[in-house]
Every structure is written in C-alpha cells, then in structure tokens.
Image (spheres, rainbow, N blue to C red):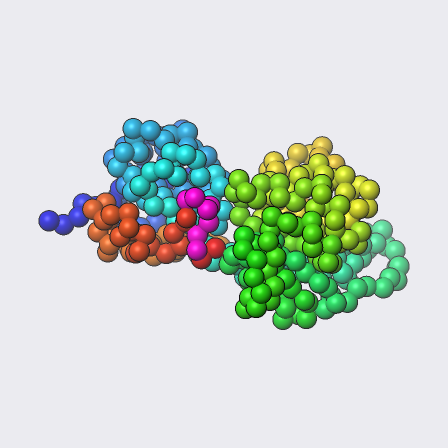
C-alpha cells in the first residue's frame, strides 16, 4: 500500500514572499498556507510543518490535539530556540533546520565588521558627511587575536575566513580540545572569563540554549581587554545587554558590532543607538542575496527525502537517518550546525 500524500502546514508571517519553489513542493505534498492565527486549523491531520516565518512562536501556542499526526517540523533558519518548548522536545516529531545556508554570508559579514572597525570606515563616513578631511592611522587586521564563541558550522566558517586573512583564531565550545582543524585550541565555554582577555576580537555565534543564555555577562565583559571589539551575530540573549551597555559606556571594552538583540526590532529609545563605539545592523548578517531561495530549496530537498523514507509511515529513527540537518532537541542544534 502506498504511503499517503504528505500534508504540510506552511507557516508564514504574511509579509514575506512565499517560497519560490512552492509549485515543486506542491508536487510532493498538499500545502496549507497559514499564519499564526490559522495555524491550529492547518495542523489538523498535517504531518509536516514548514516554519517559513522563522521567528514565530505560533507552533508552541498551537501545540495540542491538532498536532497528533505531526511527524516532522522544519524551520527555515539555523537557530531553533523558538521551537524548543517541552511539547516538541518530548514528542516523536523530528526537527530539522537550515544549518549551512548562512555559514559563509555570516563569516563575510564578520570579516567586514572587523575591517570596518580596524580601518575606521565608520569614522570616515561620518567625517564625509561633515566635509571634514581628517587623517588617522588604522590597525593591522592581521595582528588580531580572535575568539569565536560557538564552534558549529557558522563559527567554523568564520574561523577559516579570518585565518585566511592572517588572524590568529581560537574557539570556545562545549568541549575543550587542542589540534582542532579550524580553531587549533577550543576552550570550554563555561569558563569564558578565564581566557577572553587574550582576544582583540570576541565573536558570539553560539546557539541559544538554556546553557548559553547570557553566557557573556558582566564578569566576562569585565575580563575583556579595554580595546576589545565585541561582535554578536548569534542571538541577543547570549549577552547580558545591560552589562554590555555599561561596559561600552565606561570604556571597559572598546567597541561592539551588534546584529542581534534581546528585543527586535531594537527599541528606538535604547541607549545602544546613541553610542559612537557601537555599530548596529538589523539581524541581517546572513541575508545575502538569494537566501530565501536557498532556504526553500533546503526544505524541498528534505521533503523529497521524507517522501522517499516513507513519509508518515516512517519511524522517527528512519526519518532521522533520511533527513539532513536534524536537530538534537536536547542540545538545541543540529550536528551540522
């Protein structure tokens, strides 16, 4: 007997364009396009959720009897923190993400942030607006010692690119080790204050989990060099944001390039906006041209694998073996990420 045709609840925010390959997705499955307020109805009988609106928490709010047939959830993002609620964690549902799609774009964004700081590009643009000709000296970027907090796929892409420019890169992760192929040395991330002071540039790109929330706190910030450049392209909640404001205000650290924040959009009255030693971007570090198409293509690849594995008739173990970038729901990230 043939496996039944999959049913997908495609969760959108309503403002973003639908997946460019929707017609190809519909060749494989029945698709119910929905928003947060209609998700509960779309879930009835559905075996797949495609979280296209990747910051939405609507699945948690809709979890219950309507998710009885659910077998697989795919989020079109790398971070899965909005989906790691108890109901999903404890269920048989397999969770996948888009690990790998954003690795190189985020690495390039980080390199650009370092170069802009070291070469004082932000100052030059400010002086240009004022028609000021003001000569300054710049820093040698190749002299930087860099600590990357988060040694998954994005962190490794950052390490490889920065190493190619001549920077000395080490990592901070769950497990300390030496002779890592991308970082050389990986320090334990639960002891950041002990060694963060060795770095000129500190980059946060760890996944957000209960263990990493506010891992960069007042103690860690106080241990950084007064000249340190802090870059966050992970999640805003990795940092104690008030402690960061205090450190930047007191020149306890030199500068920050921030792409993510505890509250997004960043409130218009937030003190970070007014700081001359802060560069703010609106959670865009991975959004290189074509990123939505790559996200949609990743889902279609996994959908075809899902169908080939038997779809709703497959066991969780069979789906885990068939799908790519399966998330460990206890750890909060995929092996690929």
Q: Is residue 45 above or below residue 119?
A: above
Range of the magenta residues? 329-335
Asked if residue 53 lies left or right of residue 196, the reply is: left
Front in this rendered view, residue 36 or 63:
63
Asked if residue 260 lies left or right of residue 223, the reply is: left
Can residue 285 be seen in the rendering of this structure? no
Residue furthest left as drawn = 1
Q: How many marks?
A: 0
- Is 332 in the magenta? yes
Q: Is residue 75 above or below residue 169?
A: above
Main secondary-structure element of the magenta-colored stretch:
loop
- Is 33 in the magenta? no
Q: Position of residue 93 (x, y in %)?
A: 32, 42
Front in this rendered view, residue 128 or 94:
94
Q: Position of residue 145 (x, y in %)?
A: 71, 63
Residue sitting at x 77%, y 43%: 247
Q: Position of residue 74 (x, y in %)?
A: 38, 46
């Amino acid at each position: 007997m043939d496996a039944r045709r999959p049913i997908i609840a495609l969760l959108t925010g309503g403002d973003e364009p639908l997946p460019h390959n929707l017609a190809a997705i519909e060749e494989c499955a029945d698709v119910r396009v929905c928003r947060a307020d209609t998700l509960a109805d779309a879930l009835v009988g559905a075996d797949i959720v495609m979280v296209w609106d990747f910051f939405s928490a609507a699945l948690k709010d809709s979890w219950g009897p309507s998710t009885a047939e659910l077998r697989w959830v795919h989020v079109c993002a790398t971070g899965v923190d909005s989906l790691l609620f108890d109901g999903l964690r404890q269920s048989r549902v397999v969770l996948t993400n888009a690990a790998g799609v954003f690795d190189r774009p985020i690495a390039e964004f980080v390199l650009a942030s370092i170069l802009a700081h070291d070469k004082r590009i932000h100052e030059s643009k400010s002086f240009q607006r004022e028609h000021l000709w003001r000569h300054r000296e710049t820093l040698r970027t190749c002299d930087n010692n860099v600590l990357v907090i988060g040694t998954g796929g994005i962190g490794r892409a950052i390490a490889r690119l920065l190493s190619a420019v001549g920077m000395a890169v080490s990592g901070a992760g769950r497990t300390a080790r030496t002779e890592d192929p991308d970082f050389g040395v990986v320090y334990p991330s639960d002891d950041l204050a002990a060694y963060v002071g060795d770095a000129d540039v500190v980059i946060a790109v760890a996944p957000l989990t209960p263990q990493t929330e506010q891992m960069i706190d007042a103690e860690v910030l106080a241990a950084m060099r007064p000249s340190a450049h802090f870059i966050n392209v992970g999640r805003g909640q990795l940092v104690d944001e008030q402690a960061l404001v205090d450190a930047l205000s007191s020149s306890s650290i030199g500068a920050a390039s921030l792409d993510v924040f505890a509250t997004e959009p960043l409130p218009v009255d937030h003190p970070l906006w007014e700081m001359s030693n802060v560069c703010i971007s609106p959670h865009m570090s991975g959004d290189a041209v074509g990123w939505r198409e790559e996200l949609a293509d990743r889902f279609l690849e996994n959908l075809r694998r899902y169908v080939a594995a038997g779809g709703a008739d497959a066991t969780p173990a069979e789906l885990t073996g068939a799908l790519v970038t399966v998330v460990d729901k206890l750890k909060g990230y995929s092996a690929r990420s």
